[in-house]
Image: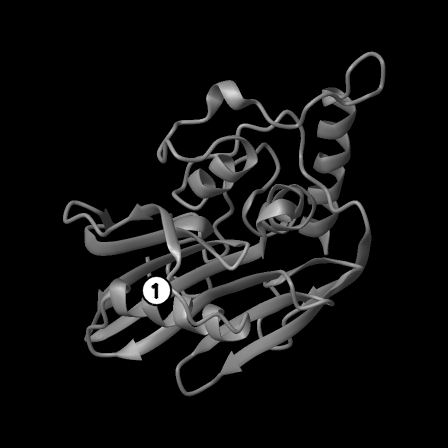
Amino acid sequence: MKKTNIYYLSVIVLILCSCSKDDTGGDIVNENNIQGLCPEIQGVTAIYWELGHGIPAPLTQVPLIPNPGQRYIHSQFPGLGFTIPQSYTPFEIADPQTGTRGVNVIRNDDSAIFRYVPGTQAVGQVSSQSIIANEINSMFSFFNFTGTPEVVCRTLPSGNQSISGIPMEFNARLLRFNNMTAIITVRSLLISGSTFSSISAVAAPTSEFETEVLNTFLPINFELLVGPGGSFVDKDEDGVPALEDPDDNNPNVP
């Protein structure tokens, strides 16, 4: 509770400091600091894509949910908690057999989703390509899409990626399909014969995507992953920030 209070205090301070003199607040996005990892996208979409790659979001103030509703807290992992917009409903994910925990936050009209699985485990070596393919197919099933998506941005595993000396696979896609835009990211490690992964996926109508990023997806990410001062949090204190940790509830999974 103390950590939560400090977070909200820091949010208030940052907002007060970032407001312009005419109290309009100005533009929350500083596009001059976008890295350009995917030249096909700009603005808020590019910022969210790069945040998934571990690049801090270049914002002029902390993003907040404009219509905050209930506060969701995972029943088995209290560290997984954040504020839900009034127009969304959380659906808890908990599978003790695979150690999977997470949440699907779905807009009440079933047209947008925020999915976060900070930890899941599979026996044996499972490629991030297989994991992200499963996530994409599940998303297509949710939205009843059976066609071929447009792959706007793609990040494939690189052999030189590692965490604490352990090889890591990172996989990401930005897709457009049936007037929807989606961003899916997967990080995975192979430790002691098991694959540990973290998964993030968001989707919304393309015409509303940037609005949903600003009003829903970014605020939830900041509450989950960004601590006071703007640095990424490390819940299990293993030296790897939550955004890059395939299991930030387990210090044995760096």
Q: Is residue 32 above or below residue 51?
A: above
Where on the picture, by quarter, is residue 97?
Answer: bottom left
* Any part of residue 247 in sight: no
How far across and how far down the image is residue 11, in percent? 72, 36
In this rendering, would 237 be left or right of 197? right
Identity of the residue furthest to the left in this view:
159
Above or below, 110 relative to 16: below
* Residue shown at 47% from the left, 22% from the top: 33
Q: Quadrant of residue 18?
A: top right
The reply, left or right, for residue 56 in relation to residue 205 is left
Q: Mark 1: which amino acid?
A: Ile
Q: Which residue corresponds to the image point at 48% horizontal and 31% vertical from the top-left?
A: 42
Q: For this rendering, which residue is in front, 234 or 221?
A: 221
Residue that lies at the very extreme toward the bottom in this rendered image: 97
Q: Residues within 10 Å of mark 1 (few under 14, many from 20)?
A: many
- Residue under numbered circle 1: 132
| Residue 253 visible from this viewpoint | yes
* Residue ID at (68%, 38%): 63
Residue drawn at the location 63% of the way across and 71% of the way down = 74
Nearest the camera: 151 or 59? 151
**Quadrant location of the C terminus in the rendered image:** bottom left
Residue 35 lies, in percent from the top left, at 40, 27
Quadrant the N terminus occupies:
bottom right
Mark 1 element type:
helix
Report x, y in % for residue 125.
19, 73
- Residue 171, compared with residue 142, is above or below; it is above
> Which residue is nearer to you in this view: 146 or 140?
146
